[in-house]
Amino acid sequence: MSATLLADPPPPAPLRSSGEPGIRIRAFEGPAGAEVLGLDLAEPLSGADFQRLHRAHLDHHVLVFRDQRITPQQQIDFSRRFGPLQIHVLHQFQLAGHPEILIVSNIIENGRPIGLGDAGVYWHSDLSYKERPSLGSMLHAQELPAEGGDTLFANMHLAWDTLPAALRSATEGLRAEHSYLAKYEELRQRSPWRPKLTDEQIAEVRPVTQPVVRTHPETGRKALFVSEHFTTRVIGMPEDESRELLAQLFAHSVRPEHIYRHRWQAHDMVFWDNRSLMHLATSFPSAMRRRLNRTTIEGDVPF
Ligand code: OGA
Ligand code: MN
């Protein structure tokens, strides 16, 4: 064997060098998700990198940025590149000085919850109960439990594409009601994270109707747009029929082959498309601490 084969390998090329495309998108195997490599979100984002992220977000629906040491303000600035931000109705869980950030956490400090601890106990798409639901949300990991606390994402384009024909024809053209209050009292009974809402807060979350099948405004792809957390009934359908139809749609949406499971790592930033996905938080031991910062980008009126 020649000596040259045993020589040290050359040093790896730097991830970024002038004139080369900076970022790489590595798609996950499975129904959704990609990792973005070679990007530090603490640095200003170039127009070209923004274009690549925008395209990748539409293609993969969930983008994962590992090890991002960014401040809340940097998360806000990055989020704003994609649209105006929405302020959550539970004002008590805003990050001090940064109302654009909703703290998602089970941590209790001085007898008071610092954030919303049960944000993801039922499948949902963020703010589907608003006339203008969210385009996408970003979660930045601050503190993670040693086990559990994953976030699951269901690809609702796949759910629509694979829906049995009879269900498809029973569903197309329908509208359904979405309400923030649908599960509120039930959650309130079993958690410290659901303060009694003021009249102003209740006025902010009046029920709305949404199409059961929506068209993604940027890609034109259809997606199921109903969820167990917020969808209460199909408009113009007898109660029992509506309940039965929604149950079938929910069950089909979250079949295992539609799901990407995100296992959080320290300083992960995850950016998903609420027009294409539903999501759910998995449980973790209640003695462990979990805290993430969420920004929520406003989307279009669904059609
Ligand atoms: C959210 C949410 C899920 C999670 O913040 O919108 O649903 O895993 N979170 O915390
Ligand atoms: Mn959510």
Image (cartoon, rainbow, N blue to C red):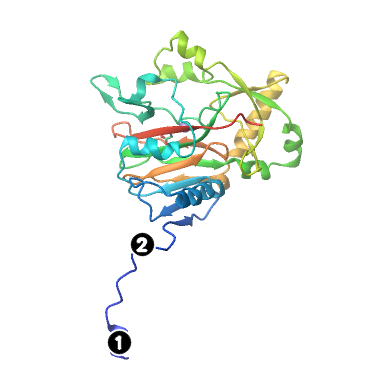
x, y percent for residue 98: 34, 27
Q: Residue at x 75, y 32 (%)?
A: 170
Numbered disc 1: secondary structure: helix
| CB under 8 Å between discs 2 and 1 | no
Q: Quadrant of the C terminus?
A: top right
Which of the marked residues, 2 or 1, is nearer the chain's N terminus? 1
**Where on the picture, by quarter, is residue 208?**
top right
**Where on the picture, by quarter, is residue 182?**
top right
Dot 2 crowding, Cα within 10 Å, few <14, some 14–19, many 20+:
few
Say above or below: 205 vs 43.
above
x, y percent for residue 230: 55, 25
Q: Which mark is residue 4?
A: 1
Compared across the picture, whether 47 is left or right of 239 comes to: left
Residue at numbered disc 2: 15
Say above or below: 154 vs 92.
below
x, y percent for residue 143: 29, 38
Q: Quadrant of the N terminus?
A: bottom left
